Amino acid sequence: MTLLYTSDPERGRIWREIFAAEASDIGFFDASQPHDPATIRYLAAWAPSAELIAGLPNLEILFSIGAGIDQFDMNALPPHIRVVRMIEPGIAAGMVEYATMAALALHRNLIDYREAQKDARWAPIKLKSAGERRIGVMGLGNLGQAVLKALAPFGFPLSGWSRSPRAMEGVTCHAGEAALPDFLAACDILICLLPLTDETRGILCRKTLSLLPRGAALVNVGRGGHLVEQDLLSLLDEAHLSGAVLDVTDPEPLPADHPFWAHPRIILTPHVASMTRADSAARALIANIRRHQAGAPIEGEVARGRGY
Ligand code: NDP
Ligand code: OXD
C-alpha cells in the first residue's frame, strides 16, 4: 500500500508528516527517497512523465495534485489506471475568493477606474445594483457551484451551464450545447469554470462571446485553452466586451510581448486563482485511499473517456 509523490517538495514535507501521523500504514515516498517502483500502487503528481508511468508496473491510481487533469498525457497512461482529480476545501476556498473578487471588480467598474486613475481623471460611473448585473458560470461542478453559492448573497441574478442537467436553488440552470445561446444571452459577467476537454477547447470564441450582451465581461479561471485569444482581443476592441479578468493563459507563463499584458481592459493574474492547500489536500487524499481500500467510490474519479 504505497504512494509515490512527485510534486512541490515543501508540500511533500507536510504530506509526509500528515501521512506518518494519520495514516502510517500507507507508505509515503517522495521521488527523492529510495523506493521499489514495483510496490507503488498510488501516484500523486501534477504532470508525470511517460517514463515515470512506464516504470511503475503495479500503479493503480493516478491522483492529480490539482483540480484539473488536462495536464496528464492520457495516451501514456494504460487504460486500467484510474485517474482522480483533487477535491479539497482549500482549492474551493481560493476559487471562491478569486471569482468573487473578479466579479465584484467588474461589477464595480474597476477596469474603468484603473484607466481613469492613470490619467488623473475623476470620472464617476452611475452605480448599477447587483440585481441589475447577471452573472453566469460555465461549469457547475465542485468549483462552479461553490462560486455561485458565494455570489448569491450579493443579489446578482445567477445562472449556470453544464453538460448534464443540474439543479441549484436560486440559480437558473441550463444544460447542453443547445442551451448555450440562451445561457450566454443572459450573462453580463461570464465566469468560465469548465475543465479543458476536447469538447470545451476554444469554447470562448467569437461565436459564443458575441452572444453575450453588448458590454458584458469575461472571467476565465478554467484553462487558457478555453479561450481563443484573438477573438477576445477583437471583441474588446469593438467594445462588444467591456473587460476580462484572466487567470489562465496558453501558454503559461505568458510571453512578455503578449498583447494581454498591456491591454487596458484586461486584468491578468499568473494562474493563482486557487492553489491546493497542503494539509487539507493530504487529508482528502488519505480519505480517498481509504475509500479505495474499502472498495467504495473514490471522490473525484475522472471518467477517462469523457475527459473530466
Ligand atoms: P468538475 O469536474 O467538478 O466540474 C466540471 C463542470 O463542467 C461540470 O458541471 C460539467 O458538467 C461541466 N462540463 C464539462 N464539460 C462540459 C461541456 N462540454 N459542456 C458543458 N459543461 C461541461 O470540475 P471542478 O469544478 O473541480 O474544476 C473545474 C476546472 O477549474 C478545472 O478542471 C480546472 O480547469 C479549473 N481550475 C482552475 C484553477 C485556477 O487556479 N485557475 C484552480 C482549480 C481548478 P456536468 O455537471 O454535466 O458533469
Ligand atoms: C488546478 C489548478 O487544477 O491549480 O488545481 O489549476
Image (cartoon, rainbow, N blue to C red):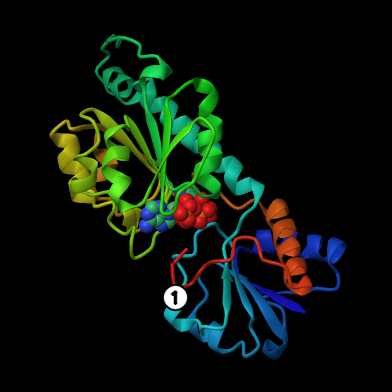
| Residue 149 spot, x, y in % from top left | 55, 34
Residue 155 drawn at (x, y percent):
48, 20
Q: Is residue 308 visible?
A: yes
Q: Please state which of residues 82 and 167 is positioned toward the viewer in this rendering.
A: 167
Residue at the far left: name it. Answer: 238
Q: Tell me what residue is drawn at x 55 percent, y 49 percent.
A: 142
Assign a secondary structure to mark 1: loop
* Residue 174 placement, left or right of 146: left
- State whether residue 131 is above or below residue 257: above
Name the quarter where the N terminus is drawn.
bottom right
Instruction: Name the spot of residue 281 as percent of width and height, x first.
Output: 68, 56
The residue identified by callout 1 is 73
Q: Is residue 180 left or right of residue 160?
A: left
Which quadrant would residue 260 be assigned to in this image? top left
Relative depth, front residue between 61 and 149: 149
Residue 181: quadrant of the picture: top left
Q: Decide if ligand 2 comes within 8 Å of the CB at mark 1.
A: no
Say whether residue 252 is visible. Answer: no
Is 251 on the left or on the right of 42, as rendered? Answer: left
Q: Which residue: 35% across, 14% down?
A: 128
40 vs 55, left or right, is right
Q: Where 219 falls versus 18 (above or below)?
A: above
| Residue 91 location (% of width, % of height) | 59, 48
Q: Quadrant of residue 159?
A: top left
The amino acid type of the residue labelled 1 equals Asp
Q: Nearer the viewer, residue 23 or 179?
A: 179
Q: How many marks?
A: 1
Q: Residues within 10 Å of mark 1 (few under 14, many from 20)?
A: few
Residue at x 64% of width, y 80% of height: 60
Instruction: Compare residues 206 and 251 and report the one nearer the observer.
Output: 206
